[in-house]
Amino acid sequence: MRVQIEGSQAVAEAVVLCRPEVIAAYPISPQTHIVERLSRMVKQGDVGRCQYLNVESEFGALSVLIGASAAGARTYTATTSQGLLFMTEAVYNAAGLGLPIVMTIANRAVGAPINIWNDHSDSMALRDAGWIQLYAETNQEAADLHIQAFRLAEELSCPVMVCMDGYILTHAYEPIDLPDQAGVDAFLPAFSPVQVLDPSDPISIGAMVGPEAFTEVKYLAHRQHLRALTLVPEIAGAFEQQFHRGSGGLYAAYRMTDADTAVIALGSVIGTIKDTVDELRDEGIAAGCLKIGCYRPFPATQLRTALEGVSRVIVVEKDLAVGIGGIVSVDVRMALNGSPIPVHTVIAGLGGRSISTESLKQMVRDARAERLSEPHFLDLNVRVVDEELARRYEQRRAGPLAEQLIRAVNAIGTKVI
Amino acid sequence: MVTAAELLSTAAFTDGKYAQAFPSFGSERMGAPVMAFCRIDTQVIRTREAVTHPDVLIVQDPTLLHQVELFAGISLGGYILINSTFSVDDLGIGEVLKSMPSDHVCVVPASDIGVKHMKRPIANTPLLGAFAAMTRVIELASVQSAMRQKFHGSLGEANATAAKEGYDHVITYLDQERSDQHHARAN
Amino acid sequence: MTTQRIKFYQTGTYTAGNRLLDDEARTVQSRLDRTNSLNSGHRACQGCGEALGARYAIDAAMKASHNRLIAVNATGCLEVFSSPYPESAWQIPWMHSLFGNAPAVASGVAAALRAKGHEHVKVVAQGGDGATVDIGFGCLSGMFERNDNVLYLCYDNEAYMNTGVQRSGATPPFARTNTTQAVGEAPGNLLGTGKNVPRIAMAHGIPYVATASVADLHDLEAKVTTAMGMNGARYIHIHVPCPLGWGSDPAHTLKVARMAVESGLFPLFEARSGAVVDRTRIRRKVPVERYLELQTRFQHLFKPQRDREAIAAIQAIADENIATYGLRESGSL
């Protein structure tokens, strides 16, 4: 059924279609509309016997799901940013125990400074915890990925994060085709756990493993996780068969056939990049774009093949590895190991800064003219930063960094016309 | 304003168009300046960047006129709708907007219309009706349909009526403007 | 024919035997069909009070739930010594997640059972004082306020023992631990710090709160059985001596526990919906010294000289407990 709906509402509807049994939620912007909608639907009786717990923290939320999943229930929660970090211990625990929990990450910047707007620093911070990470380009894909995620998680016995850009997607109203219940039931069978707490067949879950076996346990988890490289495209294919719509997959190429410049990114910015590619093509520049849909496990071989023949790669990423630069670009470089293709790191959109087609076009022109610094910070106000640094060298008690810079940038200043 | 952008996008959707509406702020805080954006197109909308060069600007809170750089980015062929009972000159923005064609700028007493039909100074609905009249991007009927979808029963009807009054206000204004211009040319 | 209940006390021995009692009044531990939920072969220290307490409590819970029980365990001594991979001493479904989340994990298990219509299966969460009183406190409070259907058992040995004896929010005043050492102007743990989690549990208004001790098996089993017959959030705080951390004789664990009860330092009581409803009277009150002198963690109060002030302060705590809970009064409350 095609409707004009807020992204968060679409995700909630998709989750309900998957017949979750236990939902735990702690509110944090910009995920609130998802958990509010789910709460209403559960309370109204629209989700069968599903139990919805209002928990005391994000750490509590994921911990509740760890117990529920171990007891054989299909489980779901959503969080972002500070909340995701607050549950870090539990995130690693869930992956280590092999529990097929599905969690939405409404991507948001991580403080300090506190910032509620979108970037990928949160999910990037936990990219190595052992969860599968899928990134949605549109709200349609966000809804679809949740349905695929439950199937993927349960087949692999591995938890899955579905990442969608906070505000940009969660709070955007756009047309969505909501799947029907019969279709989802056909696509997603009932949860059949690999391990379950059951008095008729007692087991112990969560043993301590010492040096003699820890490596093997971790390697097994790694191997299991890598199976997603096969399973993600399979499930995307099965989804397309069931719902007649392409969604998900390891990656997607746009006008890459004869591209000499490939722009790689994750999430909603891909939409803007596609418009950028079209405009550049009109200018005679052979640009193309590659969307990474599954970031963990990292589809290294597949990307390497997709990038064959390009002259340069620009990775546009909404995250910053302080002290080194890129995160996604480092993975891309590893995938291209041994190849002479240069990989440019462009840090953009941090803390919700809008990424414009104009800036992206200039970025491509600069890359082709070898004018891009490495890493390159898109739309950075260097003057303000240099002035502040100079001030700090002169004055020991220079005051809180954020406050000074905001004043300098005058972003919240009122202007008189 | 978030609801207005949402309603506009629903109206466009009802009209068979593609629409993308999103807010620019975050925390749920009453009384803070808020912006929302809506893109409408006949094709799938892919871009996610902020709207920096709007074709239409709807100002729901006139107290913001002199506090924020509201008119930056609007193109010469763009449209401006302002919720107020005062004229453009009385609002002190006559100078700023003098380069825009007069039939592209209209002040609508939207809050008053809201009070009249919904007993609360809800400006959204009349402004969307006004938008339909001024830009012709969507049909009034689609605006009204969106109202009835979002607000059920008598409230939906009240909103639909308010939308029509906003629409009629602009139609009257545009007729008057054309008539004035016609007379001005004739003289 | 008139009948009169006579209680028989066995003094000088600490056997769990119930020779003089009717069958129904005998303890779960005295039965041949006891579950041994925490089976032998675990790696606990000699004389470990927690191993004893856990076996007592979980066996009673298994009987009460007709062997339909799932246990969630926080990180700590009990978890570590009972689950050395690839072995496990647990004969029941058992899960260990993290240090601070046992109450939440248990809430999740209970929610799953409810979603599946398996509410005849019961859930117990257990952890040491560190996991309960400190790091898991937020989750514990959440479980309480939601009134989740979980019985939480806290095995209180009054410090972080598994990591080598460090102070927790349950460490008593003046006790020596490795982070409250017996040096300086105020040796040992500071007087005036610490939390009374049973009272905090009561403040949440949950259906059932009780304190218990390994020294009184009947009492402990009865409380577990009572709690298992109820729904909602329930909490039992069990005093368990740790010979290693307390510096007591491993052969005297029960004696030490009994002294704590008989001095008034560890009052045994029950509360329902926030109000104390019953307590176990002290049969023979002992001065706190009789308890303290059994443990080297308090030896700095006696050597090189007696710290009269500290001992008096501890005695005052015991006396206040006796007054608060009516531990010396006859009859019911």
Image (spheres, coloured by chain):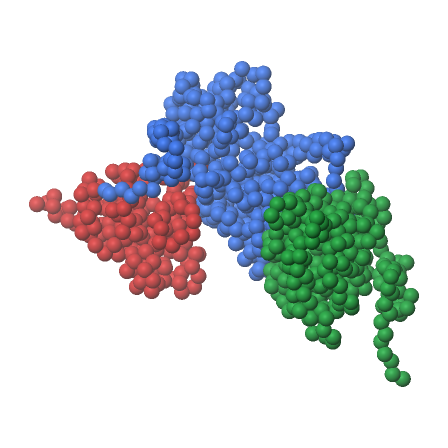
Q: Residue at x 45, y 35 (%)?
A: A350
On screen, residue A329 above or below B1: above
Residue A337 placed where, x, y %?
58, 19
Q: Residue at x 15, y 49 (%)?
A: B180
Q: Residue at x 31, y 48 (%)?
A: B58
On screen, residue C70 above or below A138: below
Asked which quadrant contains residue A194, the reply is top right
Q: In the picture, which chain is red?
A: B
On screen, residue B48 above or below B152: above
Name the side, left or right, on which C68 lies relative to B4: right
Residue A380 placed where, x, y %?
39, 30
Q: In the picture, which chain is blue?
A: A
On screen, residue C161 above or below A343: below
Q: Residue at x 66, y 69 (%)?
A: C323
Name the side, left or right, on which C48 lies relative to C185: right
- The colour chain C appears in is green
Looking at the image, the residue that sits furthest to the bottom is: C1
Residue A53 placed where, x, y %?
60, 55
